[in-house]
Image: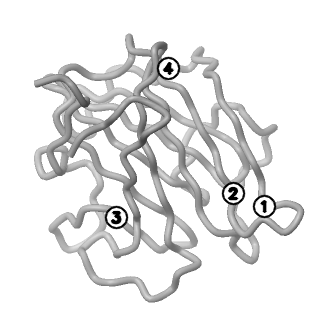
Amino acid sequence: MLIPYTPDVLVLPVVTYWDGTPCANTRLHGVVTLGAEDEGLCITASLPHQGCPSVPAAPPRTRVANLWEYDVVECFIVGAEGYLEVELGAGGHFLVLDFAMPRVRRNAYEAFVPRMTFEPCLEGKPAWRSSILIPWSMVPVPVQGVNAYVISRHHYLSYHPLPGPRPDFHQPGRFPHVRFEGRA
């Protein structure tokens, strides 16, 4: 797979449960797109409006610890020596975490203030949409793998299925290979 330069994007539809079982409930189907820009990697997530979305009581466009406890769409980006977890929430929140290896956090980016947009489910829009720009200095190099997820009301969906008896998104060695367009 290739991550192109914007306006083109790599599209990752998240339409199966974490183990690869098809999800018939299209209201849980999310989408993640990735596109390279001069300043960094743009990640956009969207998810249909949930009846009672689970969102934290914090202003939109703010960092929220443990955002995975709410309705989120996530993207994991793997490099040679670690991976980045980027979460975008149904209320316009974000969380970016850097890992040296599975579940070994290297940086929580608590002071990170990203360039970000958020479009809530208003005025007849069927889905929310959020975009974040991850500066190149935070993107793991060389980019080698990617996966995307939806967490909503104890439903766990994945772009690329992962093995195991329960959802475990921290399996970077099993993610589909990806690279930036024009790079080896």
Q: Residue at x 27, y 59 (%)?
A: 168
Check whether the beta carbons of the residues at disc 2 and disc 1 lie within 8 A of each other.
yes
- Secondary structure type for disc 1: loop
Label annotation for residue 92 = none
Q: Residues within 10 Å of mark 3 (few under 14, many from 20)?
A: many
Q: CA distance from mark 3 to mark 1?
A: 22 Å
- Say which of marks 1 and 4 sits in front: 1
Please name the residue that numbered disc 4 is placed on.
109
Q: Amino acid at mark 4?
A: Tyr
| N-term-proximal mark, 4 vs 2 | 4
Q: Residue at x 40, y 63 (%)?
A: 13
Q: Residue at x 57, y 46 (%)?
A: 67
Return the residue nearer the eye: 13 or 173: 13
Return the residue nearer the eye: 36 or 19: 36
Q: CA distance from mark 4 to mark 2?
A: 24 Å
Please name the residue that numbered disc 1 is placed on.
121
Label annotation for residue 158 = 3
Residue furthest out toward the right: 123
